[in-house]
């Protein structure tokens, strides 16, 4: 990494190198001085770079500290607000209130059930008796249907007068021909 100021100086020394041995020694000294300056500048650049990194780290640490401070402050406000909201509440009072609400809902359900019942008819009938009577009626209807089956004159189909075809005889010769064809085809494929 060469600095822009060193390049013209090195070129100037290279151009004047033709002036002899004395100028060559002078050029070497000047080149050494330029290299020393370059090393010094590189060292300073490294120090400045390190300083900037340290400053950046400190800036980020301060930002994090400020953020943490704000979060903590807001958590304190939230805690105070919740404490204030719950100040007039007692868990026993809340339980009592919830029990009162449950009782009132049950009462409302009972009232709704009482209102929805039909008044004046059907209350004196027992549901079990009604079911038993329904079963008796269904059984009577079933018995009646079973007894009426024989009374109907249902025509039956006629018996076929033709005989069934006989079973064809096995064709052994055809099977043997087919096997021979299969063997020939297998041999050709190889």
Image (cartoon, rainbow, N blue to C red):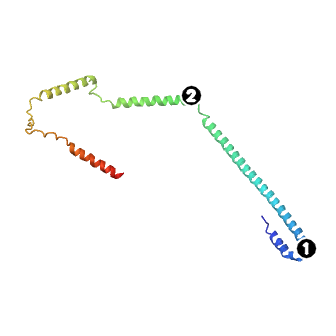
Upstream in sequence: badge 2 or badge 1: 1
Location of the N terminus (image quadrant): bottom right
| Crowdedness near tag 2: few (<14), some (14–19) or many (≥20) residues, C-alpha within 10 Å | few
| Residue linked to disc 1 | 21
**Residue 126 seen in this snapshot:** no
Taking depth in this image into account, of 161 and 164 the one nearest to the observer is 164
- Dot 2: what SS? helix
Name which residue lies at 69% across and 45% down.
Answer: 68
Taking depth in this image into account, of 103 and 48 the one nearest to the observer is 48
| Residue linked to disc 2 | 92
Q: Residue furthest bottom?
A: 19
- Residue 26 in picture, x, y percent from top left: 90, 71
Name which residue lies at 60% across and 35% down.
Answer: 86
Q: Is residue 158 above or below residue 4?
A: above
Q: In which quadrant of the rendered view does residue 176 lie?
A: top left
Left or right position of 80 against 20: left
- Residue 109 in picture, x, y percent from top left: 40, 30
- Residue 33 in picture, x, y percent from top left: 87, 66
- Residue 31 in picture, x, y percent from top left: 86, 68
Q: Is residue 63 above or below residue 113?
A: below
Taking depth in this image into account, of 15 and 171 the one nearest to the observer is 171
């Amino acid at each position: 990494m060469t600095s822009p100021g060193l390049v013209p100086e090195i070129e100037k020394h290279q151009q004047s190198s033709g002036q002899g041995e004395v100028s060559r020694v002078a050029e070497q000294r000047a080149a050494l001085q330029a290299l020393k300056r370059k090393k010094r500048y590189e060292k300073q650049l490294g120090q400045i770079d390190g300083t900037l990194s340290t400053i950046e780290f400190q800036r980020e640490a301060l930002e994090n500290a400020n953020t943490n401070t704000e979060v903590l402050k807001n958590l304190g406000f939230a805690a105070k607000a919740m404490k204030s909201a719950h100040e007039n509440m007692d868990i026993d009072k809340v339980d009592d209130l919830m029990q009162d609400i449950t009782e009132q809902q049950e009462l409302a359900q009972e009232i709704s059930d009482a209102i929805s019942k039909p008044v004046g008819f059907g209350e004196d009938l027992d549901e079990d008796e009604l079911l038993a009577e329904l079963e008796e009626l269904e059984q009577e209807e079933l018995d009646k249907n079973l007894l009426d089956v024989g009374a109907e004159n249902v025509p039956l189909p006629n018996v076929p007068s033709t005989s069934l075809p006989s079973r064809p005889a096995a064709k052994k010769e055809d099977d043997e021909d087919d096997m021979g064809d299969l063997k020939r085809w297998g041999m050709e494929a190889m």
